[in-house]
Amino acid sequence: MIELIDLEKSFDDIKAVNRVSLNVKDGEVFGLVGTNGAGKSTILRTIAGVIKPDLGVVLVDNRPVYDNPDVKKDVFYISDEQYFLPNSTPEEMAEYYEGIYENFDKLRFLKMCQGFGLDAKRKISTFSKGMKKQVSILLGVCSGTKYLLCDETFDGLDPVVRQGVKSLFAAEMADRGMTPIIASHNLRELEDICDHVGLLHLGGVILSEDIADMKVGMQKVQCVFESEADENNALEGLDVLVHDKRGRLHTITIRGEREDIENAFKRGNPVFFEVLALTLEEIFISETEVVGYDIRKFILG
Amino acid sequence: MTSGNLSLGDRIRNRKKYINSTLWTSLIALPLMAIYYIFGLIMTITRTFNYAEVSGQSMNKFYNSKLDAVIVVMGFKQIGWLLAMFIAIMFAYQGFSYLFSQSKLDFYLSQPTTRYQRIRKNFANAIGTFTLMYVAVEIIALIVAACFGAVNGPVLLNVLVETIRTIITFSVVYSVTVLAMFLSGNMPTAILLTGFFAFIPAIISWVLLELKDMFFATYVDRGELNVYLSPLADRVYNFISAREYLEGLNYNQNYNAVFDFIKTNWMHELDTIIVGIVAFILVFTVSKARRVEHAGKSIIFRPFRWIVKISICVISGILAILFMHTIYFSKQNIRTHILICIIMVITAVIVGCVIEVLFDNNNIKSFNKGIAQTLMAVAILFLIFMIHKGDLCGYDSYIPNPDSVESCAFIDGPCTYSYYTHSDNYFEDYAEDNMYITDVDSFIEIAKVGMASMKQNSAIMKESGIYQNTGWNKTILYRLKNGKKIYRNILIPYDVDPALMDKIISSDEYKTGEFECFGDDVLRNLNNKDNVQTVDYSNGFEAVSTTTISYGELSDAYRKDVLENYSYSLCTNELPIGQINFTSSGSGDYINAQLDVYPEYKNTIALLEKNNAMLPDKVDASKVDSITVYNFYSGLDFENMTDDEKISVTNPKQVMVKYTDKKQIQEILDAMVNYSFPGEWFSRKYYTTPQYSIDINSGKTMYGGYGNGFYSFKHGEVPDFVVKDTNQ
């Protein structure tokens, strides 16, 4: 498990990370979402042991990570701007990493390169941005580390490759319990891959929850009432997060278990009533609006 | 198969690939080293073959030349250390350039190593790679040299020691460059900082010496920059030292020469090593404080940034002082000093602004930042200026405590001996090496008078711009008991107490330290029978030559005469009547000695007479065709004018009169003084009438019709007809 406890980091006068506390459980895909400058990369680089926090601590499996090679053996960091040794090929990078990570599997890497259509003997400098990202991801996966930190890694990947990478992550998680932590400025990119999402804004955590929990604890209902009295009757005692009304059609986002909400609506005797599936985006909009943020402005654009 | 199961061979192969990709600069370094050491050696040795053939060298000389060629390319005399320094800088920038790039920092620092491990690994890679390349190239070059028969034990030892020195130089320069990089946030700043570390000690040392030279009247320019904390200066110093010191030794066939050289130059070796150790420790200390986010900044630590800025501002200000001094060299007064101060301040402020702009990544808007540091630099400059201008450290009035002085010397004797075996004169520093005056009290009395006179004369000269000839300029040396040597320039006034002067000048300590004949064992032992030894004697008008006098005979006679007769009184009351010019040449040696002969030098005169090599001290009028008298100040009576009146004379009229009348010629010869061989304590001002000069014209002397001597009239003895003829 990775624990971030009261993490603070400033660059000159700018507070990049402001008292951030997060927990990343083993075996889950953790998504870090936020705008540019929200502190995602700083947090990932701190977890990778590149940056020393000003305050607070990062514990990886209860061990501090900064300048600690034993811990770093378990962490592979894919930076937003990947660096490769000068004039190197994927194969040469694999050979380099063989000397760095004990569990690096070069043969597997070469096979995966083949699978992703990457020429392992071609100079990486001639690769496209997306191909370079693929090489980085494959190197990270084949390093055999427990934690894989991906900074904007899915940005620039075509849908097919994205799907392939997701499958790869899923397989790694199933096989050896790999824990990916993925930072992105785009919530939609993480929707179908993350188990847990931390939402960052201006260096602080607005929200950090399991997506499943959020989905279970929040319902979206579309309904039509006969009268206002019915409506009041139905909504009495419910934790309404968002209430949108177009004509007679109500769209209401409510915090609570599905069964409780269905029972409540039955009290109001609606003309039409349906519980809909919430997208991650809607969950976030609802949750953050409650605490005073309009994330449509800074996440969904 | 994971990397945990890799074989040793695979690991080595991977490591080699890593070094190739991270130290690709070695691909540049290796050919350069091969060109310098292997091809350079072949060319140098083959050159000795050609030279031996052309000059008909003996086998022994040829062998020596070949050995020397190896030492010139690979030994103490090599200049390959410059290449080593270049490679060190190249490797450092290659190995640590990641410090300036976010993506590289992410790449390297996220790997399972500590910062220290990474630094250690880079150091090991760089030093290991260089050592491997250097040793490989050296071995090949030595094999080549051996094939040419140019290797022996001492040469091997020389090359071995030099190999260690070069590896140390590489490591030290590498450490210093890495330190510069760790203190910088971007590449241009790192390059500037590397230059700062490389040159700043020498620049500081140089500007301080120049300031002394500019402000202190008694400063002696010994041409020695005492530069410390600079591996570059250490290497330059040792390189020059090797070229000079090893010339005089049969070093390439002598193991001891190698150890002697190290003994002589250990201070600079130690300085280099200390710089290396300090830089190495600082690299680790600074790396601890350095953060990833420092990448992209200029100099990352504020206190160090201040030090750099203040240093550069102060040095620039001093350079401005020196520049202004050059412009106002001939004349300085309070106005010029104020102007110098203004220029000094303006320079420091402008440089401070430029530095701030550079510090802020060329942001011109930052020119007015760091005012506190600029003010501090200006304050330091004023302090330096005042210390020197007002001589607050008492440089020009320094008189050591007599109890602390072991011995003293006048070190700028006439140096009348030349003995060249290669390029340097064996007797160049004879007085400094051999004069040990222990009558410290008397010496200090003279020095006090001389320093006061020097300061006064210098002040007058700076104010008026006119040099006044009021005494003898001498360089003195105090050898202190603590081992320090203190040099000063003094001006001993012509009217100094003769009794005081004689206490020193008449002492055997002075004579044996002043006259090279007392330290001429090296010449007596030469015993080169093939050499042609010639003794010429000249009285300024005529010369005579003989080859029948050996150097030993001459030296014995001269030593006796000097010890018995030489004194300050003799020098000030009389002039030498002639001069012996001894030469010996052949077999690569060239010896020349010039010995002044006073009338009291009976032993020397007897030896010359015995060998028909003596001439009369008076010019024979019958041999003179005509005499030309020059009056440089026609219409003026210089003898009876005050110094101020003399200085005020501008555009004097010069008159020349030629005399052919035998009676007039004889009269002129009787009133004439021959100062062709003035001796050490001579003052033309006190012996002659500088207003007049005399040329003796004759077709009968060996100098083609003209005597080569210098003549004038004795004080108050200018013949009336000359005064009349030349003042019309």
Image (cartoon, rainbow, N blue to C red):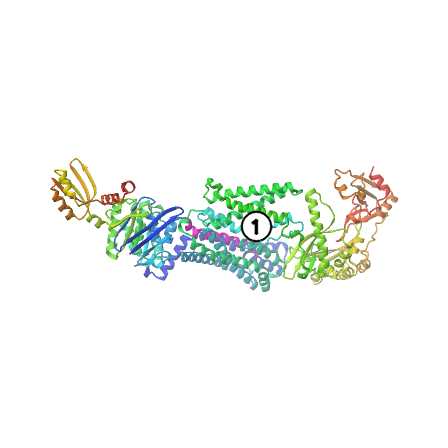
Q: Amino acid at mark 1?
A: Ile
Q: Is residue B585 magenta?
A: no
How many other residues sit within 10 Å of disc 1, few (<14), some (14-19) or many (≥20)? some
Q: Secondary structure at mark 1?
A: helix
**Residue furthest toward the right?**
B663
Residue at image mark 1: B204
Q: Please identify the quadrant where the C terminus of chain B is shown.
A: top right
Q: Please identify the quadrant where the N terminus of chain B is shown.
A: bottom left
Q: Which residues are magenta?
A: B74-100
- The relative height of residue B293 versus residue B633 in the rendered view (above or below) is below
Instruction: Report whether A252 appears left or right of B38.
Output: left
Mark 1 belongs to chain: B
Task: Determine which quarter of the picture holds residue B464.
Answer: top right
Q: Horizontal and vertical percent for residue B702?
A: 79, 49
**Residue furthest toward the top?**
A247
The residue closer to the viewer here, B627 or B327, is B327
User: Which residue is pictured at 62% across the width and 41% down the height?
Assistant: B338
What count of labels does the image hold? Answer: 1
- The relative height of residue B255 versus residue A295 in the rendered view (above or below) is below
Instruction: Report whether A57 appears left or right of B589.
Output: left
Which SS type dominates the magenta stretch?
helix
Q: Horizontal and vertical percent for residue B561?
A: 78, 60
The residue closer to the viewer here, B522 or B361, is B361
Q: Horizontal and vertical percent for residue B554?
A: 76, 60
